[in-house]
Image (spheres, rainbow, N blue to C red):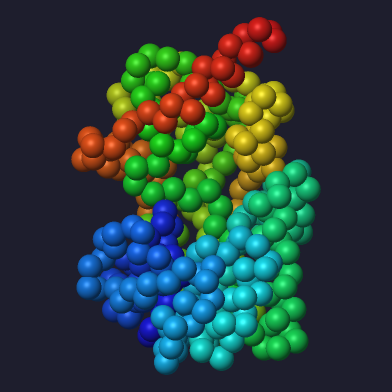
């Protein structure tokens, strides 16, 4: 099987590349070459900017792929260009949507792929929903061989999912004995999937004719609270966290760039039914519990001492939010 990833070196796509290679799949990447490929000559790289469609056509001239996955599409306009470009040169086009498209607030305690896609709070989710609608139209009217995949909160080694950011700023605050912020009261339920686990389910859909025209989310079955997220992070660091709980609405008032993801997604309890992906990919099972993922992330940072640990904007935002919250109480 021959597959093309538009992108291929990101948080999720790098794990999917490794998984595909481990299964003997021929992998091609299309990207600008701004990031050195960690895969060497195991992956064929086509240099082009996906926004420059003429350069893409030239880079892919004479190529045909069993599967094309565009990890970068965020708008209906970009999707339309993909449909025009890849119709006829691939047997399956995979669109990366988002599990944040599901109805907010949640209507039911367990989310399936048939749960209504309606998120009135987060523009990113609304754009993904528009793309999904266009793809279904292309499939039913023109036979465009699409598959929709909705990742939920997916992290990789080196990530520390938190209310503020995903890098080492929050863990460093824990190590320094500083307070860290958890939105709400920290008891809402959340699903965090390691990218290596996601990849096992995802690659099982590639080249699978039964997946054409279908929509899937791929998540772990493990469910944690946001308090547990930060407790597991602290345990991996060998410290005890000093948690300050602040309502999502308050964070959104002062820091809307952070707050939109809370109001539009993370403030709610979200639990996913993975029956469908398990039916289409027999044997799929997530193997990395979150506490193990945090140990892996700590090890990743220990192996990369050259990377700055603190993002100054996130650090200043946290300090500012703590001050504002103290004044409001």
For the question of whether residue 248 can be seen, the reply is no
Q: Quadrant of residue 127?
A: bottom right
Query: Looking at the picture, does residue 302 appear above or below residue 239?
Result: below
Query: Looking at the picture, does residue 329 appear above or below residue 95?
Result: above
Q: Position of residue 311 (x, y in %)?
A: 42, 30
The front one of 115 and 137 is: 137
The front one of 74 and 296 is: 74
How many numbered circles does the render carry? 0
Q: Position of residue 19 (x, y in %)?
A: 34, 67
**Left or right, residue 89 beside residue 1:** right
Quadrant where the C terminus sits is: top right
Q: Residue at x 50, y 64 (%)?
A: 71
For the question of whether residue 180 can be seen, the reply is yes
Quadrant where the N terminus sits is: bottom left
Q: Residue at x 54, y 68 (%)?
A: 51
Q: Position of residue 271 (x, y in %)?
A: 61, 48
Q: Quadrant of residue 159?
A: top left
Q: Position of residue 260 (x, y in %)?
A: 67, 39
Query: Looking at the picture, does residue 323 appear above or below residue 313?
Result: above
Query: Looking at the picture, does residue 311 appear above or below residue 146?
Result: above
Q: Residue at x 22, y 73 (%)?
A: 41
Q: Residue at x 55, y 57 (%)?
A: 151
The front one of 88 and 147 is: 88
């Amino acid at each position: 099987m021959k597959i093309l990833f538009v992108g291929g070196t990101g948080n999720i796509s790098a794990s999917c590349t490794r998984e595909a290679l481990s299964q003997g799949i021929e992998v091609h990447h299309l990207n600008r070459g701004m990031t050195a490929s960690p895969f060497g000559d195991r992956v064929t790289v086509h240099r082009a900017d996906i926004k420059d469609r003429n350069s893409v056509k030239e880079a892919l001239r004479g190529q045909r792929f069993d599967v094309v996955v565009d990890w970068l599409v965020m708008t209906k306009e970009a999707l339309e260009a993909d449909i025009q470009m890849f119709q006829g040169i691939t047997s399956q086009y995979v669109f990366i949507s988002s599990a944040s498209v599901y109805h907010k607030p949640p209507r039911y305690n367990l989310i399936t792929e048939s749960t209504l896609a309606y998120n009135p709070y987060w523009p990113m989710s609304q754009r993904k929903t528009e793309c999904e609608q266009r793809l279904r139209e292309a499939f039913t009217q023109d036979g465009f061989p699409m598959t929709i995949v909705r990742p939920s909160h997916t992290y990789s080694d080196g990530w520390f999912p938190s209310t503020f950011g995903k890098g080492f700023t929050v863990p460093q605050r824990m190590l320094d004995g500083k307070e860290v912020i958890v939105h709400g009261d920290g008891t809402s339920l959340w699903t965090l999937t390691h990218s290596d686990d996601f990849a096992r389910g995802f690659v099982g859909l590639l080249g699978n004719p039964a997946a054409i025209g279908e929509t899937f989310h791929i998540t772990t079955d493990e469910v944690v609270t946001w308090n547990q997220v930060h407790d597991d992070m602290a345990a991996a660091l060998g410290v005890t966290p000093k948690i300050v709980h602040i309502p999502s609405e308050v964070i959104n008032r002062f820091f809307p760039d952070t707050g939109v993801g809370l109001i539009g997604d993370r403030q709610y309890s979200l639990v996913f039914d993975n029956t469908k992906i398990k039916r289409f990919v027999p044997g799929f099972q997530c193997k990395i519990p979150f506490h193990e993922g945090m140990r892996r992330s700590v090890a990743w940072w220990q192996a990369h001492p050259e990377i700055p640990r603190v993002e100054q904007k996130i650090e200043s935002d946290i300090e500012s939010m703590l001050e504002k919250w103290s004044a409001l109480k």
